[in-house]
Amino acid sequence: MPEIIIIPMKKFTTVKDVDDLKELLSLAQKVKQNPFDYQEMGRNKTLGLLFFNPSLRTRLSTQKAAINLGMNVMVMNLNNDGWSIELEDGTVMNEGTQEHIKEAAGVISQYCDIIGVRTFASLTDKIDDYDEVILNKFIDYATVPVVSLESATLHPLQSFADVITIDENKTKPKPKVVLTWAPHPKALPQAVANSFVEWINETDVELVITSPKGFDLSSQFTKGVEINHNQNEALAAADFVYAKNWSSYNDYGKIGTELDDWTITKEKMKLTNNAKFMHCLPVRRNVVVSDEVIDSKNSLVLEQANNRTYAAQTILLKMLQHKSCHSD
Ligand code: AN0
Ligand code: CP
């Protein structure tokens, strides 16, 4: 094991769970350079990954991260394969739900040293979504560290990977980063966008958010950030263009229609400072972004996906330092 001091971590749900982002970024680079240097740390430890929603990147990159650390991994799709979970306390469970989250989280904590949970926003109940009811109950009832694999309002492993990617690709100390809304036929959560804003705000960039009117993110994330409802103006001189669709926060869960001119095209990218293009994936080609842009040499989407492994590995490494993960 290399001689490095790693500060333990009990939960990873937001950038607020990070003591020192610079330290985290430098640990991520060490992990990326020598991913197999820490195999002893995960020996005989088990990661449980619980999915209430689909996933490709999060599922595979977090498994890969755990394998790199010498851990064992168990994955479960709770919606398809598990019992239907009750969230309310005191309910007489004589209807649809079969197992209380209290037992579910308690039981999984017997089998796993670290638990990951993916639980998307309902987009029907804004208060429950923004209170992070499901993730917080898991954290309350689990006795081991919990890592968010995208919750109702945030996607911290994605944002950590995005910050790593921007750090690696910037060519000036304070680049201009534009987060732009893009069209999409289905209602998507605000989590990726909220989380990106939260994380990028902790770094030295000029951030501008652009979205159609009616698609402002919650002010709890955008307070103090420049917002421009004119996409072409916002894109001017951008060094990074991060595209993402999200459904309306104000008119909760509503999608935008007849907004096809928000697609990121080659013409739009010409307004920028030869910007790098970013998206968390999965992406709908020629809806969110044109083929030409995502296939161009300026596209960072695969680098982002690659960095998901090192983001997850860095967080798992910190969680393995937590006292609940030590047998002594
Ligand atoms: C999800 C979202 O927008 O939150 C996951 C992104 C990582 N995207 C889709 O459901 C298409
Ligand atoms: N970016 C991301 O989290 O992808 P998945 O939904 O495929 O995990």
Image (cartoon, rainbow, N blue to C red):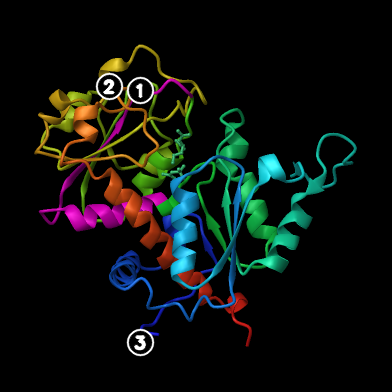
Residue underneath mark 1: 183
Towards the viewer: 225 or 168: 168
| Mark 1: secondary structure | loop
Q: Is residue 199 visible?
A: no
Q: Is residue 171 above or below residue 91?
A: below
Query: Which quarter shows the N terminus?
Result: bottom left
Looking at the image, residue 291 sits to the left or right of residue 271; the answer is: right
Distance from Cα at disc 3 to Cα at disc 1? 48 Å
Q: Amino acid at mark 2?
A: Trp
- To which quarter of the image does residue 123 belong? top right
Residue underneath mark 3: 3
Q: Residue visible at 54% across and 78% down?
A: 43
Looking at the image, residue 41 sits to the left or right of residue 140; the answer is: left
Q: Earlier in the sequence, mark 3 or mark 2?
A: 3
Give coordinates of residue 41: x percent, y percent.
49, 79
What residue range appears in magenta?
158-186
Towards the viewer: 248 or 27: 27
| Label ID, residue 73 | none
The reply to whether dot 3 and dot 1 touch (C-beta < 8 Å) is: no
> Is residue 81 rendered magenta in the image?
no
Residue underneath mark 2: 262
Q: Categorize mark 2 by other alpha carbons within 10 Å: few (<14), some (14-19), many (20+).
A: many
Distance from Cα at disc 1 to Cα at disc 2? 6 Å
Q: Residue visible at 63% across and 88% down?
A: 328
Q: Amino acid at mark 1?
A: Pro
Give coordinates of residue 182: x percent, y percent.
32, 26
Q: Residue visible at 43% across and 36% down?
A: 218
